Image (spheres, grey):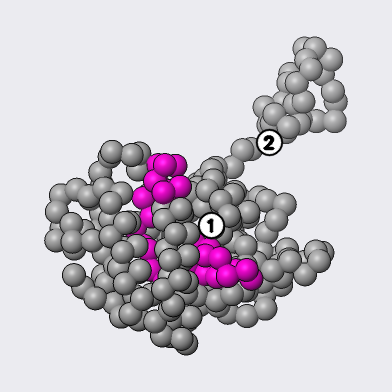
Amino acid sequence: MDCRPWSRESKKKWKDSTIDRLKASKTVWPIPQIEQVFLPDFKIKSQINEYSFKSLELICNGVFGKVYKVEKLNSNGDLYAMKILEKSSVVCENAVQQVKNEVQIQSLCGHHPFIVNCPFFWQNRNQLFIVSEYVGGGELLKLLHKYGPLPEELCRVYFAELVIIIDFLHNAGVIYRDIKPENILLDDNGHLQLIDFGLSKWLPQGCHTSTICGTTQYMAPEVLESEPYYSHAVDWWSAGVLLFQMLTNQVKLF
């Protein structure tokens, strides 16, 4: 009487089953926890990876990593901003859900003309990668440093675009929580481009949250005073502070 093998399949093929016994007998190794915790948002195997880009220069240093200006290989010189986050730092700061929210929100809301899209994001064993469209006009903050108070007509246009952005995010169920000139870029046509959704959160209209976060000069009183809950209104407060800054080139704590 023939006996079927318990582990690997021999070269002999059984005729009584359509199951591929060679594949079925292979060991399925578990995904390491450091990779599993970032799934499904950050894929492990992706057609686009870190070897698909050429690093050109360092743009800035962040809390969890660095941001580089990169060029996509085998393209027409397409430029992107690649954020590389260290997994160890993200995990130590209990920011796993925070970075997952970041790519979810930016990728789903990036079709808006005033929001920078992030078409690619993935992970390797030690790092997370978030690749966003590159905006070459520089930060709104640098414009303020260079020219000081901006003309009222220009402030009116910029503030109108900012209102459109915030209203869109709130209607999409997102609270941004970090409106400031460092997070606003200018494109080649002079329009605003919102970046960095690291502190953003899914929050339906009418709901509240309690996490204390943001940049102190732009934070609403209810956040600074550690009140139990606050709403989307904190983004409007930050927008008002930014408008004051554009008109006066000063940041005032009200």
Residue 15: image quadrant is: top right
Question: What percent of the width, then of the height, locates residue 117?
Answer: 58, 56
Q: Nearer the viewer, residue 17 or 217?
A: 217
Going from N to C along the chain, the mark reached first, 1 or 2, is: 2
Q: Left of 96 or right of it: where is 25?
A: right
Q: Is residue 56 left or right of residue 202?
A: right
Image quadrant in which the N terminus is located:
top right
Q: Are dots 1 and 2 in contact, CB under 8 Å?
A: no
Q: Does 169 sit above or below residue 76?
A: above
The single residue placed furthest to the front in the displayed view is 153
What residue do we see at 52% from left, 69% from top? 185
Element class at badge 2: loop
| Relative height, residue 90 to residue 69 (above, below) | above
Q: Is residue 94 above or below residue 247?
A: above
The three-letter code of the residue at mark 1 reads: Ile
Q: Residue at 72% x, 52% y: name it.
A: 47
* Quadrant showing the C terminus: bottom left
